[in-house]
Image: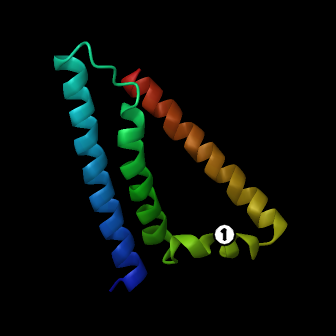
Amino acid sequence: MMGPVRNGGALKLLSGGLLAGLCGVLVHWVHVHWHQVPVGGGLVVVGLPGAFALTGFLELLTGHPFLSLASKWDDLAGWQRGLLGTLVAALAFGVALCALVLFG
């Protein structure tokens, strides 16, 4: 059974992801149907709920509240932070590269 932090994280992930998806569809619809309306700010409209969903993902993954993760990170040894930081950066680069190949 999941704890309250993980349940809250799952709820944030689902609600934020759903809202980001709906905002993305809305921005796309406006872009397609109303050519005169600039949608350059559409990334912000989609990005805010997406960021909320990512905080929920971190809470679900780690089991700790988002605001306490910085102190947990600081408690790690230097070599652990370096290794995990490099791993996270490489993973983010790989995901971005895959997204560019699939949707580019």
28 versus 91 height, above or below:
above
- The structure residue drawn at horizontal position 36% and vertical position 40%, both measured from the top left corner, is 45
Q: Tell which of 99 and 65 is nearer to you.
A: 65
- The structure residue drawn at horizontal position 69% and vertical position 70%, both measured from the top left corner, is 73
Residue 3 visible (yes or no): no
**Considering the numbered disc 1 on the image, is that residue within a helix, a strand or a loop?**
helix
Residue furthest left in the image:
33
Q: Is residue 75 left or right of residue 48?
A: right
Which quadrant of the structure image shows residue 46? Answer: top left
Mark 1 lies on residue = 70
Residue 87 visible (yes or no): yes
Residue 13 picture location, percent across and down: 35, 61
Q: Quadrant of the N terminus?
A: bottom left
Residue 77 picture location, percent across and down: 81, 71
98 versus 69 height, above or below:
above
28 versus 88 height, above or below:
above
Q: Quadrant of the C terminus?
A: top left
Residue 8 picture location, percent across and down: 36, 75
Decide: few, some or many residues near mark 1? Use Cα within 10 Å; few <14, some 14-19, many ≥20. Answer: few
- The structure residue drawn at horizontal position 69% and vertical position 59%, both measured from the top left corner, is 84
Residue furthest top in the image:
36
Q: Tell which of 84 and 47 is nearer to you.
A: 47
Asked which colour scheme the image uses, the reply is rainbow
Residue 52 picture location, percent across and down: 41, 57
Number of numbered markers: 1
Q: Amino acid at mark 1?
A: Ala
Q: Tell which of 7 and 83 is nearer to you.
A: 7
70 versus 102 height, above or below:
below
- The structure residue drawn at horizontal position 28% and vertical position 37%, both measured from the top left corner, is 24
